[in-house]
């Protein structure tokens, strides 16, 4: 049985506005932001606004909302970054690689012959993250439009 949801995790704090984030998109059920330690240009995170530790305790409505947003973000980053593909990653529990215990999905634009950068813990340039967030947000707005 998975542990209980901890509302002091970093993503819960971001969702409550207690910590900053480079917001890309938000609707009634999801929040999208730039990963501050991107493994590739345009690397975004899609989070539900509900308290879900991971896929093991999320309800069906939450998963549906998250993956609908994942698809929208994937289309936007493919277009905006001229990507050749998309890598979607979602980790569950420590043995599965999960580090932050709030459900989140990584959306990473991919390019032929370019490997993912290692997850080193080094943060990206905030100006670059802000520019990428604005670029993706504008594309998503146009797609909705």
Image (cartoon, rainbow, N blue to C red):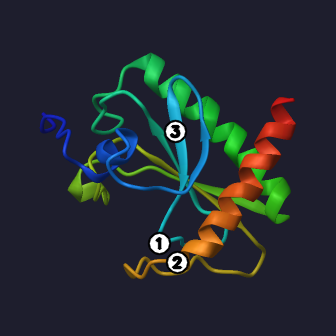
Residue identifier under label 1 = 37
- Categorize mark 3 by other alpha carbons within 10 Å: few (<14), some (14-19), many (20+): many
Rendered view: 109 above or below 70:
below
The reply to whether callout 2 and callout 1 are in contact (CB within 8 Å) is yes
Rendered view: 62 above or below 85:
above
Corner quadrant of residue 22: bottom right
Quick one: label 3 or label 1, which is nearer the N terminus? Answer: 3
Task: Please say whether residue 36 is visible from this viewpoint.
Answer: yes
- Name which residue lies at 71% across and 38% down: 72
Residue lying furthest top in this view? 61
Q: Position of residue 29 (x, y in %)?
A: 50, 25
- Categorize mark 1 by other alpha carbons within 10 Å: few (<14), some (14-19), many (20+): some
Q: CA distance from mark 3 to mark 2?
A: 20 Å
- Name which residue lies at 75% across and 81% down: 113
Corner quadrant of residue 119: bottom left
Mark 2 or mark 1: which is in front?
A: 2
Q: Is residue 97 left or right of residue 118?
A: left
The reply to whether callout 3 and callout 1 are in contact (CB within 8 Å) is no
- Secondary element under disc 2, as helix, strand or loop, is loop
Q: CA distance from mark 2 to mark 1?
A: 6 Å
- Secondary element under disc 3, as helix, strand or loop, is strand
Residue identifier under label 2 = 124
- Secondary element under disc 1, as helix, strand or loop, is loop
Q: Is residue 10 left or right of residue 80?
A: left
- Categorize mark 2 by other alpha carbons within 10 Å: few (<14), some (14-19), many (20+): some
The quadrant of the rendering that contains the C terminus is: top right
Q: Position of residue 99 (x, y in %)?
A: 28, 59
Residue identifier under label 3 = 31
């Amino acid at each position: 049985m998975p542990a209980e949801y901890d509302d002091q995790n970093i993503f819960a704090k971001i969702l409550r506005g207690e910590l900053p984030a480079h917001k890309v998109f938000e609707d009634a059920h999801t929040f999208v932001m730039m990963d501050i330690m991107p493994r590739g240009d345009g690397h975004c995170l899609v989070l539900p606004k509900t308290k879900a530790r991971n896929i093991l305790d999320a309800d069906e409505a939450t998963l549906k909302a998250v993956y609908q947003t994942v698809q929208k973000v994937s289309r936007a980053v493919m277009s905006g970054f001229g990507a050749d593909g998309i890598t979607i990653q979602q980790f569950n529990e420590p043995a599965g690689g999960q580090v932050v215990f709030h459900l989140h999905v990584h959306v990473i634009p991919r390019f032929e012959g370019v490997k993912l950068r290692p997850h080193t813990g080094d943060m990206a340039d905030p100006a670059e993250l802000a520019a990428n967030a604005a670029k993706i947000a504008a594309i998503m707005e146009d797609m909705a439009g």
